[in-house]
Amino acid sequence: MVANRKSARASVRAYRSKLKNKGLRQVNIWLPDTRSPEFRKECLRQSRLAAAAEKSSPLDDLLNAAAGSVEGWT
């Protein structure tokens, strides 16, 4: 079983080396766990806040102004 472990490690090392030689680099990122109860609670909290916000809030005015200045964007 130890031989298989070394073999797997060597295989992964060779694979990563091959990608690196192609000009790629490995990037690790952390994302919110969308399956967690805390994530669900926070989504509900933010959704309720957004639904309760007044239609003529300063944020809406800012977003509308920003949306009107995107001419020429591709």
Image: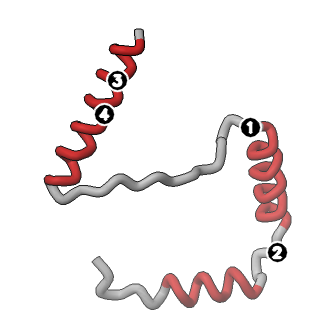
Relative to 38, residue 54 above or below? below
Relative to 8, residue 45 above or below? below
Judged by depth in the image, the label closer to the viewer, 4 or 1, is: 4
Q: Which mark is residue 12?
A: 4
Q: Which image quadrant for residue 48?
A: bottom right
Residue corresponding to mark 2: 54
Alpha-carbon span between mark 2 and mark 4:
54 Å
Residue corresponding to mark 1: 36
Few, some or many residues within 10 Å of mark 4 (<14, 14–19, 20+): few
47 and 12: which one is in front? 12
Image marks 4 and 3: residues in contact by CB distance under 8 Å? no
Judged by depth in the image, the label closer to the viewer, 2 or 3, is: 3
What secondary structure is marked by label 4? helix
Relative to 35, residue 8 above or below? above
Q: Which mark is residue 66?
A: none
Closer to the chain start, of discs 2 and 4, is 4
52 and 24: which one is in front? 24
Q: Which image quadrant for residue 25?
A: bottom left
Q: Position of residue 1 (x, y in %)?
A: 41, 9
Q: Label 3 is placed on what type of residue? A: Lys
Residue corresponding to mark 3: 6
Closer to the chain start, of discs 3 and 1, is 3
Alpha-carbon span between mark 4 and mark 3:
10 Å
In the displayed structure image, the side of residue 48 where residue 2 appears, left or right: left
